Amino acid sequence: MKFVARDSELEASLKVKDGELELGRGVMAENADLQAKVAGLTAELNAKATEVEGLKGELSVSIDKLAATISESVSLEDALHISRSELTEEKEASGCEVAGLEGRVKELEAELAALNGQLASLRAEDASRRSQPSMSRASANPVVPRHLYELWVYAEAWLDVYKAFHAEGWATKVEVQAVHTEVSASREACRYDPLTPDGDDINSDDANRLASDLWYKDAYPTEDDV
């Protein structure tokens, strides 16, 4: 009976040991599975870390590019601001220049109007003189009066000015023709003098030549000529 009881105890103890052994095997299997998972996660973590390092490099390059783009944008804004300032200054300067030219044109027009008045007065005076025998072409005094000659030269110069204005688009053809008419009138005022160059031989470029004609210098010597 004692052996039977002893055998039963051993069997029970053996079953307990077998259970513990099976439990240990299960724990070992689970531990191995966990280790495999840990190894997989470690490898994945290392891959992610490598990817993060790559992304850091790309981010650094992108940051450098962004900084360069911002710097270029600032430079372009400065250049644009300078260009706008220069454009504004040029517009203001052009406006002042145009205003000055317009003012000068008005002054010239006023002078021309005054000249026209003088020429009208001279035409009347010349007509009166022509009606008198002493002022005919047979006059014993062949010298052209100084003021008539100077008005002629002045009118020729004005014709050159208005032709230049017409070439630049600042004067119309009608205005040029009006000045040309005044030039013709001033020539007519001098024609009674036989020493005056014939009107047909004089064109709009003769103002400087007229100013240096010897016949005029002989008639009106200056202090340098005396």
Image (tube, rainbow, N blue to C red):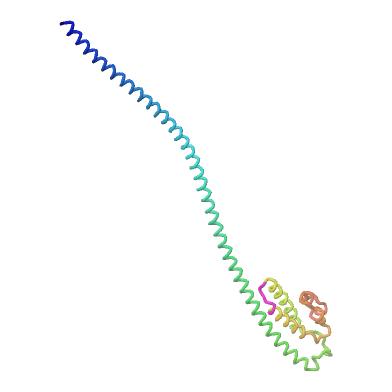
Return the x and y of residue 170 as percentages of the image width and height.
66, 73
In the figure, residue 39 lies in which quadrant? top left
Task: Assign the magenta stretch its main secondary structure.
Answer: loop
The C terminus - image quarter: bottom right
The N terminus - image quarter: top left
Outermost bottom residue:
132
In the figure, residue 121 lies in which quadrant? bottom right
Reply yes or no: does residue 83 show up in magenta.
no
Residue displayed at 80% across by 87% down = 192
| Relative side of 7 to 139, left or right | left
Residue displayed at 52% across by 45% down = 68
The image shows residue 118, relative to residue 30, as above or below, that is below
Give 55 or 121, whichever is nearer the viewer. Answer: 55
| Relative side of 18 to 100, left or right | left
In the figure, residue 12 lies in which quadrant? top left
Return the x and y of residue 214 as percentages of the image width and height.
82, 77
The residues colored magenta run: 169-174
Q: How many marks?
A: 0
Return the x and y of residue 112 as percentages of the image width and height.
67, 80
| Relative side of 91 to 7, left or right | right
Give 223 or 55, whichever is nearer the viewer. Answer: 55
Residue displayed at 63% across by 74% down = 104
Outermost left residue:
1
The image shows residue 104, relative to residue 139, as above or below, that is above
Return the x and y of residue 185 as percentages of the image width and height.
74, 84
